[in-house]
Amino acid sequence: MTFDWSWERAQEVLPLLLEGFKITLLATVFGIALAAALGLAVAVAGRAPSRLVRAPVRAVTEFVRSTPLVVQLVFAVALFPGTDPLYVGTAVLGIHYAGYTSEVYRAGIDAVPRGQWEACTALSMSGRRTWQAVILPQAIRNVLPALGNYAISMFKETPFLAIITVSEMVRQAREYGAEHFYYTEAFTLAGLIFLAASYPTSLLVRSLEKRLGH
Amino acid sequence: MATDQPVKKTGPEDAPGGTSGSALVHFDQVVKRYGDHTVLDHLDFEVQRGKHVTLIGPSGSGKTTILRLLMTLEKVSGGVIWVDGEPLTHRRTPGGKLKSADEKHLRQVRKKIGMVFQQFNLFPNMKVLQNIIEAPVNVLGMDKDEAAERARGLLELVGLSDKIDAHPTQLSGGQQQRVAIARALAMRPEILLLDEVTSALDPELVAGVLDLLRDIARSTDITMLCVTHEMGFARDISDTVMMFNEGRVIESGTPEKIFTAPEHERTRDFLGAIL
């Protein structure tokens, strides 16, 4: 494969790639939403007074973080045959990343000063209200930039979905290449599209970090 | 009123009879240990309703621990704390015995008690008004408009009417502490705990906060327990001053007696060192 570039081929492959990019974006948006919600639930459950809650939560997150994403994807598809691989893949992305976001939330919760908890106790607030009105708003503010970084990182890992036959962008590029024996244009453009989406997002995350005073 | 003589060393199970007389707060042989370190050693004292009691003594003598136990921020290692004739640290079983309190019991009993902290501990994610009405609305179930109306009154009392829409971070330390005082009062506590409330303030802001607390002490019937290093303030507001040393009350009495004619040598040394 030499680097001979054809604008015609580029034009031909671009619509296919953009079609794939829609899938990529869809998987990322829903994946990160799931990771954000599930990670929060895991982090809060990890602080439960009862060991009966903490231990299984801990075990599941350890498992999720100790096995590769690809293995989890293939395993999940085998577990739910007949379900659209895009759905399965997005769910697995979300669960996989929840293993990491839960740690981020945990750090964010730990960073809320003990005095805040004590003030809630001194005002006789319920545990639920303490979390809802005082701890989580402060913790989530602390961790927004870190969550943004995980969103970018998940975005770049969506090509793994190709393994379970999801037609995301990189799979589209590979299929085009396999068909026409020209990979250069397809993969270069795919790379540029990733860059065009990731870079502004990471600038956004950085400005968010600055604004929140990190 | 207070004594450091642990006459009988009884566990809570042996003495479920409650408190003697009309004391609002009764520390009954209270022990607090952290590991091997005993912070409070069979502490026994009472506070009558409406009285203002100041706890003085060297750092690490267990004064703040007393407030934290009363606020249920910590658990006793032994003994019972009674509030208004009811066990705070324990709950009564149907058989009349006392068992360690669970969270449900604690949530019920701690409503009578409010606390102002050294570090203010305002909620930075809420404006001043919301800081004050959060608990009245969500804990006491007060109507939101009514709570806001009362909050306005309290802000006027603490001299911060114009800061109702400010964020805590926009306020000076002294202003934050005033809001914290208003927030504690909004819960209408019977007992107000003040834990070194001016220790974190810049010197020029101390007097204003202490003046406010003097006003509150004079104009309300709230029972106050106060840990402070401000001896002038202690002398002004206290009915009783209790001198602590190594987890024991070594001397207690009226401010006149403690500050002008302390009996105990340790008290004389302490006052000599800080006055």
Image (cartoon, grey):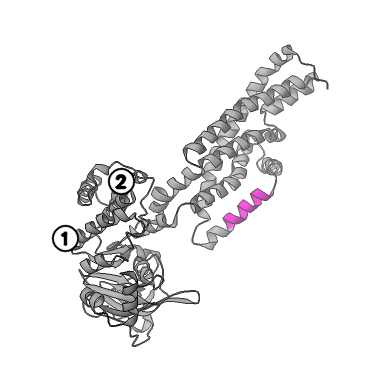
Mark carried by residue B128: 2
Label 1–label 2 contact, CB within 8 A = no
Please, which residue is most extreme toward the left here? B219
The secondary element bearing badge 1 is classed as: helix
Pick the front one: B67 or B140:
B67
What residue is disc 1 on?
B219
Residue numbers of the magenta segment: A56-66
Who comes first in sequence, dot 1 or dot 2? 2
Which image quarter: residue A113?
bottom left
Residue B239 appears at what percent x and percent y? 21, 72
Which chain is home to disc 2?
B
The secondary element bearing badge 2 is classed as: helix
Pick the front one: A80 or A101:
A101
Tell me if residue B80 can be seen.
no
Please, which residue is most extreme toward the right here? A1
Q: Residues within 10 Å of mark 2 (few under 14, many from 20)?
A: many
Which image quarter: residue B255?
bottom left
Left or right, B120 with reference to A155: left
Name the magenta segment's main secondary structure: helix
Q: Determine whether B80 is above or below B176 in the image.
A: below
Amino acid carrying mark 2 in the image: Val
